[in-house]
Amino acid sequence: MSDPVSLTTDRPGQVASTTPPAPGRSRHLSDRWLAVLFISPALLLLLAMSVFPLLWALYLSFTDYSATRGGPATFVWFGNYTAILASAQVHLRALTTLIYVVGAVALQTVLGFSIAYLISRRTHGRGLLTTLFLVPMMLSPVVVGLFWRFMLDAQFGVINSMLGSLGLGQVEWLTRQQTALFSLIVVDTWQWTPFIMLIALAGLTAVPKYLYEAASIDRASEWFRFRTITLPLVWPLLLIAVLFRAIEAFRLFDLVYILTSGGPGVSTETLSFHVYKVAFLGFNTGTASAYGILMVLIVIVLTQLYLRYLNKLKED
Amino acid sequence: MAVSVDEAVATGPARDRTPSARRLGGRGRSVLEVVLLTVLAVVMLFPVLWMIETSIKENRDVYAIPAKFFNFTVTMDHFKDVFVAPGGGRSALSVAFLNSVLVAGVSTALATVLGVPAAWAYSRFSVKAKKDQLFFILSTRFMPPVVVVIPIFLMYRQVGLIDSKLGLILIYAAFNVPFTIWMMKGFVDEVPAEYEDAAMLDGYTRMQAFWRFTLPLLLPGIAATAVFALIFSWNEFVFAIFLTSSDGVRTAPPAIAGLIGGTTVDWGLVAAASLVFALPVLIFAYLVRKHLVAGVTLGAVRR
Amino acid sequence: MRYPKRIGRLSVPRRTAHLATAALLVAAMAACGQDDGANSSAPKAPATIPELTKDPLTLSFIWFDWPPAHALETFANAEYTKERPNVTIKVNTVPNANWHDAMFTQFAAHKTDFDIPVLDSQHIGEAVTNGNILDITDFVKKNIDVKAYNPYLLAAYGQFPQAETGKRDENASLYGLPLLGDTWTMIYRKDLIGDTPPKTWDEMISVAEKCQADNPGVSGLAFHQANGSDAAAVTYNTVNGLYGGNLWDAKARKIEGVINDAAGQEAMDILVNKMKPLTAKGSGNWFIDEVNAAVAQGKACIAFNWIAASGALLDPKQSTLGSTKEEILDKLGFAPLPSQKTNLVPLGGMGMHVSAYSSKEKQAEALNFMKWFEQADIQKKWAAAGGVPARTDALESPEFLNAGPFNKVYTESVPRMRDMWNVPEYARLIDIENTNVNAALNGAKAPKDALNDIAKEQQSVLDSSGRKGGGGL
């Protein structure tokens, strides 16, 4: 992921070449057509299903179009964009999303890495342990959301029942401002800690043994070895895992939809959830499109900055 | 790719006992680590265990406070309800499961058929602005689905694909093609181009060389890639809930979500349906465990 | 990565590709612009039912997933086919949370896989304004015996512009006919608070308070508080009505200063400071299911729920109150809501409407079904099958009154009903109210601020027609 992600939509996927023609014309002609033949169907599908909708959304984002009201769309140019950027409602959702993304990703990184580290130090049963830990990640967000909603229910949920057995009081997991966002973070962490764990484990098991052995001869302390050998080798992988998780968490919709539907009030409404409301409650398609385009832009810009940082880190 | 990891996750040979364990006090620490790991495993797996328990409890016990962990009557009724409608005949859920099989299966096949040749072409030929193209392709995967669903919806209503399985198949295929290309390009890169060159010297065309020599070597990679595409399509919820509405088209995730919000929630049924729904994914994931790291990072991190 | 440069080279003429792409985009966008000149008034249904087909035909409904939807499918397939053997009835169901979206996304697509959408009364404005459902005024005049109904029930499920309470406007157009009537019932524990239900809302609160104090582990109250659908909003609207408040001034299109007047503030105060403390901890996301579960588990003294959703309470398999229906009924009582300054109760239930995008053949069949459904004997059969009819004769028939312990409650509540706004902006208005009431109930907002925010935000939705950009935020 060291290259810049380009999302220029104006000339997607042209297949062309600048290298001068090489000898052996007939064979190369067939190669060329083969490449076109092989690449273009995939690109055409992407053009139709990803690029075209995005361009369309871009066009709509400058209008006041509504998918239900009909009537011609009138251009409001940057009216939607300025309204979104100035809206206190949007700022509130942005803050919620930020807390959620940072909280969830930080928690699962720490937990995921710890589990991976512990597993990597075992000699037996690593395969089984890894497989077991991976189960949550494979479940559909719908299943995860529904079931955690059941477990976190203040009255009938198993979590409060266990707290009760321990003599602790009931916690309103999903209906208080702070706890609801916290619950969202916990559930996301439960589901995605395995992801970080998996990737960290890949890095940890790849640390060449002789490095440790050399360090062991030097009688280096455990912590010193961890800091100077293990971490530097795993760090780049971990950063990529964090990038993937952050992008995914930023897009989060289904878990909110099922677990809290944004409540209490709007305190767990993420940006994605807010876009949904704008798009489908009032069918303000133009505004929703602008909102979506802004979200895509944020992902691109932040990813670019992050990758640049990552590259710099690698060079050092 | 920039990062490469040499050893597989779960399949690598066990490492020698770490030096620390040999030291004084190493044993105590080792015990502590095992305890910690066990605790973490229990915490992570508890919801799944609870789901299994709930699916075999009678509804009366599901709500019991304090929660019943062991002393309840076991019933298989919920699993029956997943497949059989109350009045007999097929349940709406089982129809949704079949729809899921069809939609996930066909969209995966489509993504594979489109993606594998493209990946091969990207790997073998020099294509103008290849890196840009590849990253552009990947970036389409990072758009928030709720954002994509709006223009897709407008487009589908124009061509009459709303509330149709074909519509879902196409959008899932479009979401899986970038993944397939990225994943498969890595696998193709691992197959030396010299095989094809040699075959072509023997008089085969490049197409034949691909078909007869490279493709067979790619099959395990294709299988792994397809499984990941399948898991994505199988679990997907956002497009499914916004683009479909009728029982005959609905896939399993919205159908399971629809189990709540009536007049009573049958959590036993929710749990049973969730388990039945999750089982194929878990089996598939186990089958492709060697490729999990590449799979979950869209091929960005390879072993 | 491998770059066998010496082999592959590609050069599709670049300009051509550019042009082709551009042409494709322009053509597609132009195509998408075309249908947008949709007429913004509803098309008219014929006054007389056109000739019906003899070929096999499936008549599709769309509703949300709950027992009445399944009851309707069974009932219609058993009874309607006696008259029209070539017709099959299919009731498509979607999750409640997705109900509005599922119908209106299809309306937006100008192509529906249903012929009879079951709209909530408040959805009518949005559907009529966008021309999604047929104007059946002439059809009703010619085919339906309007005198057989409480005029308000006809208005509630069909008239636009709406009649919030009371009389039907004879000059307004009709767009639907009643399918399932509904309102809230008070569910009370006879074994805990006695056989006589409280008469006023204040009395109800103090009875609940005492019951909660006397019975540890049982909450005084259980009602809808969730922020989805119309849950928390209906709760506030009910209390608002009972304490003499108004949701809006329909003629002046004014909400600011109306909903948050003194009566409105008092209602919010009662709801948050008097009623909420009597509910179970963590009940702030409860809707129909959770209230039912609390009652069935014996965890509430007094609860409020929609009548159409109360059947599940009598199911011994889901209940800890008794092992037979009779045992459960020894403990559970059903009564109309107590009154306070007024006796208003929330209008629930839904009407049948005809999709404007259905084929002519199916629209004719839909009209025929509606005519058939609104006959006196069919309404009684519908009542016996678990439905809630609308015709006065059916409502007063023993078939209905004996079909469920809460049916009497409905019949008594009919003259007391009040609805919300059914303007096209309904979905946004309800969301504003839901989220704010839910926030107030869960301590995320001060009650007064929540109410003032509702007034301000709803007013701005009503006033936003002339705005440039950013609508819907």
Image (spheres, helix red, strand yellow):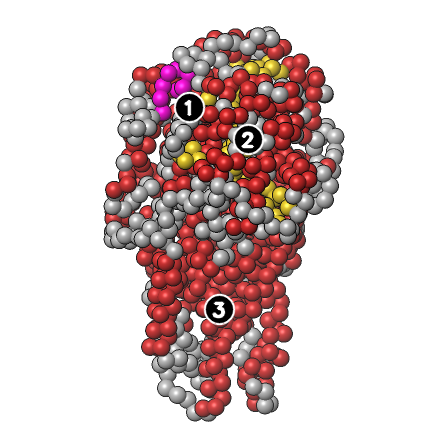
- Real-space Cα separation, disc 3 to disc 2, in angstroms: 50 Å
Q: Amino acid at mark 1?
A: Lys
Q: Residue C56 placed where, x, y %? A: 64, 51
Q: From this viewpoint, is residue B264 visible?
A: no
Residue segment shown in magenta: C239-247
- Indicate yes or no whether the magenta region holds residue C241: yes
Choose between C272 and C238: the one closer to the eye.
Answer: C238
The chain under label 1 reads C
- Kindly identify which residue carries mark 2: C180
Q: Residue C171 placed where, x, y %? A: 38, 32
Secondary structure beneath label 3:
helix
- Real-space Cα separation, disc 1 to disc 2, in angstroms: 19 Å
Q: Amino acid at mark 2?
A: Leu
- Neighbours of disc 1 within 10 Å: few (<14), some (14-19), many (20+): some
Q: Amino acid at mark 3?
A: Ala
- Kindly identify which residue carries mark 1: C167
Q: Which mark is residue A42?
A: 3
Q: Earlier along the polypeptide chain: callout 1 or callout 2?
A: 1
Counting labels gives 3
Q: Residue C134 placed where, x, y %? A: 46, 43
- Neighbours of disc 3 within 10 Å: few (<14), some (14-19), many (20+): many
Q: Please name the residue shown 70% across and 17% down the image.
A: C326
Question: What is the quadrant of the C terminus of chain C in the image?
Answer: top left
Q: Please name the residue shown 44% across and 41% down the image.
A: C135
